[in-house]
Amino acid sequence: MTGGMAFIYDEKNDFENFANSTSIVWQKVETDYWKKFLKSNITEFQNKTSSKKAKMILDNFDLELKNFKQVCPIEMLDKLDNPISSKPFIKKAG
């Protein structure tokens, strides 16, 4: 993931065990813009692949949304046209 946004379907809620917090931030999908973006991408994927998992997620999108983590490189946070949160990010002193 170089300079991009990722959405991780994290049913087991264990993503943080595999993530490098010095280079990325992750959170639940918060803003309407990114919720619509995610749903649109899953819809496109489902239309192209007929994925049963994607269909299940879309059929229960409001409930399944809690299983997604939105992941962004720290250096991209201030460059996004659509912020991932309405709250400010504060980097911890290392």
Image (cartoon, rainbow, N blue to C red):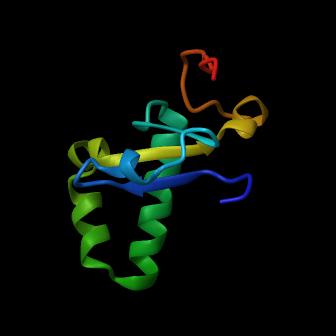
**In the foreground, 40 or 2:** 2
Is 85 on the left or on the right of 66, as rendered? Answer: right
Name which quarter of the figure residue 47 lies in: bottom left
Count of marks, rendered view: 0
Q: Quadrant of the N terminus?
A: bottom right
Q: Position of residue 65 (x, y in %)?
A: 31, 45
Is 92 on the left or on the right of 30, as rendered? Answer: right
Name which quarter of the figure residue 49 lies in: bottom left
41 w.r.t. 51: above or below:
above
Q: Residue furthest right?
A: 79
20 w.r.t. 79: above or below:
below
Q: Residue furthest front?
A: 94
Q: Position of residue 45 (x, y in %)?
A: 45, 73
Name which quarter of the figure residue 8 lies in: bottom left
6 w.r.t. 72: above or below:
below
12 w.r.t. 33: above or below:
below
Is 54 on the left or on the right of 35, as rendered? Answer: left
Q: Residue at x 53, y 46 (%)?
A: 71
Q: Position of residue 2 (x, y in %)?
A: 72, 58
Q: Position of residue 91 (x, y in %)?
A: 63, 21
Is 18 on the left or on the right of 73, as rendered? Answer: left
**In the foreground, 27 or 37:** 27
Q: Quadrant of the C terminus?
A: top right
Q: Residue at x 60, y 42 (%)?
A: 24
Q: Residue at x 43, y 38 (%)?
A: 29
Q: Residue at x 24, y 77 (%)?
A: 52
